[in-house]
Image: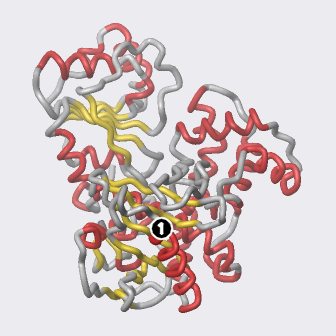
Amino acid sequence: MEDKAKYRPRIADNLLKRKLKGKGAVLIEGAKWCGKTRTAEQIAKSTLYMTAPGMADQNIRLALINPELLLRGDNPRLIDEWQVAPQLWDAVRFEADHRGALGLFILTGSSVPADMSHVIHTGTGRIGWLKMRPMSLWESGESSGDVSLNALFDGAQNISGISQLDLEKVAFLACRGGWPLAVDMDEETALDQAFDYVDAVTKRDIQASDGVERDPERVHRLLRSYARHQGSQVSNACIRDDLQENEGDALDVDTIASYIKALKRIFVIEDVEAWNPNLRSKTAIRTSDTRYFTDPSIATAALGIGPQDLVADLRTFGFVFEALCVRDLRVYAESINGKVYHYRDKNGLECDAVVHLRDGRYGLVEIKLGGEKLIEEGVVTLKSLADKIDSDKMKRPSFLMVLTATGNYAYQREDGVYVVPIGTLKD
């Protein structure tokens, strides 16, 4: 096991501490390799690794006949990969309920259990949820953190920040991804990690998600098609047509839906919901989710491309960069009780990201690689959407921001719009 002294602090650290103060147990969910167990280990006083070599079968049997035995230990007690024995859910809920204490257990899981039919209680009021994602650029040390998303919501003026990232570096970071293991590796080895992740997903993890055997090559073809359509709202029928045209595969719509559902269960895919604001006009708002992977490197690895390929194809780079920004915005928003949405209406007006907080405040974000022309396009989009919102029925946006890959400086324009390189942003 890696030395805990080398642990890189995560935004989820404080979220976990806060949630443990309010619930008997907290479930941390997220993709494999994103750092769930390492984060939980920093707080846990005792640990049960359900899938430890030589112990998995015994632990699963004990979960059936004497789960209380597995829960013994100093609190908070970490139960890693709890989902291999879903019966533990009711046991944890029972202990949390009857001990009358908070912060007793931390559960970590890299997939949603395939069968929860024998679980009696939902855990409401006893068990809290925490979603972890791969590292943001602030967590991995590539963002200066000069610009705080929280400060923008609080009306920060005259922001300033300096990014050290150029286009080639951003391309590398998108392909490397936010996998904690990769952050301190040399570049070539770091780039291998996303390819290894995709191999694991196609050959094993997707099968384990629901017990259904699937052809790894077909899974890989679907991942490639999904990668070609990330950032869009295409239907499963469109993915079917793309598979037939570009992959020579004839998966039907229902099979595609089952593959996507399985990939969501193991947190490979995390689509963005549509935002539905109150508008001055009766413009119809598109309600389809926007397609995204949980990390941009999944798309580049599925497509078999690297940093230089992105630099040579700026159109593809734009979609991959958008996925990177959505990942980071999700991580940052989570820490301030926020969620990231996407907006698109029938007239084609589209906003890449809407960060909406629990208290009703929200910010509008356009994502651009950079350059004055693209920034101006983003500004026009942001202002157009802001003008459509009915401020009598909901708040005005807290900020308008163009989030860029290039550009050394973060600043606020004379018209109030923020221009922020991703290499300066934090929560």
Image vertical order of residue 179 relative to residue 43, above or below? below
Residue at the far left: name it.
Answer: 100
Residue 71 located left or right of residue 229: left
**Residue 230 visible in the shown view:** no
As displayed, is residue 340 above or below residue 171? above
The residue carrying mark 1 is: 325
Q: Is residue 61 above or below residue 264?
A: above
Q: Position of residue 361 (x, y in %)?
A: 31, 60
Coordinates of residue 332 in the picture (x, y in percent): 34, 61
At a point 35% along the width and 21% down the height, the residue shown is 122
The 10 Å Cα crowd at callout 1, few under 14, some 14 to 19, many 20 or more, is many
The x, y position of residue 206, in whole percent, is: 61, 37
Residue beneath the point at 37% across and 63% down: 391
Q: Is residue 210 left or right of residue 38?
A: right
Residue under the image location 67 percent in, 38 percent down: 259
Q: Determine the secondary structure under disc 1.
A: helix
